Image (spheres, rainbow, N blue to C red):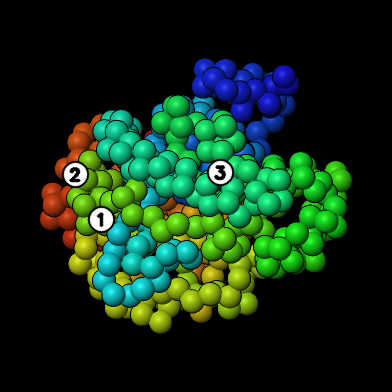
């Protein structure tokens, strides 16, 4: 095993030891991008090609000065990620992403496959509270696995006539870190299915025909090229992307695996974390070129903003590269109107995705860099002094009621946490 591969070793201690070896052998540090940040990096503890150590290293190699872990339903990789970032002298944040029940009559909000529920995050989880919040999430991970097993059966029922079956215990669980407190997501199921399809059809026109004619999935010409490329090292991820584009052939609505949003907010807030709604935005002509046209929350965005504010959300998280400038300008205006903290992050769960976000170099998004360092400062103070020193505690708001002034104050603290 070469040194870089060691960053994805099965054992945490070997991964961190591998990082020491990489740093000792490198001739020069990367050129850092002062106007860049990413607070939404998934790892193997949900779904990603990267361990927490490898994810931190990839952020470092991309020139980021800070990085944030964001796994689904799990904080099991947070401690490793923090250690790796410390070794790399990166600022770091910890967060967790969950699906939550939010039945306010809006229908579909930011979840492509299900109504009356939302994707949300707890940002700024201090290291001192990682274990307690992760233990709380254990119930929901277990319930999610019950549903995962049912979806595997649904896939088997549909594909058995083609000689393809999917067993949750045999085919899916080994792809995950569930034994170490990781979550298993729909992407795990589809990756396992991609393996089966690869074994059945190979990188052939027969695979394309199966996807288009039997599954009725659209396959863009560019993606067809990827799927037929015999040397494509990302083949399984590209195939997963095609399968994920339309989940109706296997998706079962989530229920017990989702906390009620207000309950999750109460738990996260009690531990000093910052609850954030994840803005998705309608898709017309996809900015990234890989999203199908679909309506989300734009038609009722202000009404939704009022409801999430009422529920206790303190922040809006969004990806500057996913939406149009017009969408983001409107969102930013509403964040200012309703005094919501803005957090950025580019969703990383595939080897083709870039850790850096060029849009953050634009003046209209420069404030998101301060937001990231404010998150880092928030985590530091909650960890060192207690929850009452967090950005949104009653004590802090009384001392510094203006949110923008508070962000600057905490950003200064955050920047001092790295050398």
Q: CA distance from mark 3 to mark 2?
A: 32 Å
Residue at numbered disc 2: 270
Q: Are marks 1 and 2 in contact (CB under 8 Å)?
A: no
Q: Nearer the viewer, residue 140 or 233?
A: 140
Percent position of residue 395, x then y: 13, 49
Give residue 258's position: percent from left, percent from top: 32, 52
Is mark 3 in CB contact (under 8 Å) with mark 2? Answer: no
Which quadrant holds residue 288?
bottom right
> Of tags 1 and 2, which is closer to the observer?
1
Q: Which residue is mark 3?
A: 188
Q: Residue at x 61, y 39 (%)?
A: 49
Q: Which mark is residue 414?
A: none
SS of the residue under disc 3? helix
The CA span between labels 1 and 2 is 16 Å
Question: Separation of disc 3 and disc 1 at Cα?
Answer: 25 Å
Q: Is residue 148 above or below residue 358?
A: above
State which tag comes first along the sequence, 3 or 1: 3
Could you tell me if residue 350 is visible in this image?
Answer: no
Label total for image: 3
User: Which residue is drawn at the image coordinates 61% and 28% (left, top)?
Assistant: 8
The structure residue drawn at horizontal position 57% and vertical position 60%, both measured from the top left corner, is 249
Q: Which residue is mark 1?
A: 260
Q: Position of residue 80 (x, y in %)?
A: 46, 28
Residue 396 lies, with reference to residue 405, above or below; the image says above
Neighbour class for label 3 at 10 Å: few (<14), some, many (≥20)? many
**Do we see residue 97 in this rendering?**
yes
**Figure quadrant of the N terminus:** top right
- In the picture provided, is 359 more to the left or to the right than 202? left
Between 378 and 115, the one lying in front of the other is: 115
């Amino acid at each position: 095993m070469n040194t870089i591969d060691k960053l994805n070793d099965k054992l945490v201690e070997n991964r961190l030891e591998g990082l020491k070896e990489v740093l000792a052998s490198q001739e020069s540090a990367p050129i850092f991008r002062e106007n860049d940040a990413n607070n939404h990096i998934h790892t193997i503890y949900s779904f990603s090609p990267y361990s927490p150590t490898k994810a931190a290293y990839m952020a470092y190699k991309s020139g980021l000065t800070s990085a944030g872990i964001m796994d689904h339903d799990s904080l099991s990789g947070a401690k490793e990620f923090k250690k790796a970032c410390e070794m790399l002298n990166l600022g770091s944040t910890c967060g967790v992403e969950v699906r939550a029940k939010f039945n306010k009559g809006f229908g579909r909000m930011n979840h492509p496959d299900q109504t009356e529920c939302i994707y949300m995050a707890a940002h700024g989880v201090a290291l001192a509270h990682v274990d307690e919040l992760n233990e709380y999430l254990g119930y929901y991970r277990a319930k999610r696995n019950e549903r995962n097993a049912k979806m595997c059966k649904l896939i088997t029922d549909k594909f058995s006539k083609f000689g393809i079956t999917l067993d949750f215990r045999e085919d899916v669980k080994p792809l995950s870190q569930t034994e170490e407190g990781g979550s298993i997501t729909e992407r795990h199921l589809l990756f396992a299915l991609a393996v089966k399809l690869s074994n059945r059809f190979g990188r052939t026109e027969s695979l394309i025909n199966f996807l288009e004619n039997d599954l009725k999935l659209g396959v863009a010409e560019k993606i067809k090229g990827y799927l037929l490329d015999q040397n494509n090292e990302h083949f399984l991820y590209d195939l997963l992307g095609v399968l994920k584009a339309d989940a109706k052939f296997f998706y079962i609505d989530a229920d017990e695996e989702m906390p009620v949003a207000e309950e999750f907010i109460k738990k996260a807030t009690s531990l000093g974390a910052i609850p954030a709604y994840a803005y998705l935005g309608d898709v017309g002509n996809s900015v990234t070129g890989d999203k199908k046209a679909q309506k989300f929350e734009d038609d009722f965005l202000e009404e939704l903003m009022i409801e999430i504010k009422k529920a206790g959300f303190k922040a809006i998280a969004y990806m500057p590269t996913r939406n149009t400038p017009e969408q983001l300008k409107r969102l930013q205006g509403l964040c200012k109107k309703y005094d919501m903290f803005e957090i950025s992050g580019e969703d990383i769960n595939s080897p083709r995705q870039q850790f850096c976000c060029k849009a953050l170099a634009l003046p209209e998004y420069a404030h998101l860099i301060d937001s990231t360092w404010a998150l880092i400062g928030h985590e530091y103070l909650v960890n060192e002094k207690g929850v009452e020193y967090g950005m949104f505690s009653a004590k802090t708001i009384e001392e510094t009621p203006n949110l923008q002034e508070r962000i600057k104050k905490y950003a200064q603290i955050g920047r001092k946490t790295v050398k």
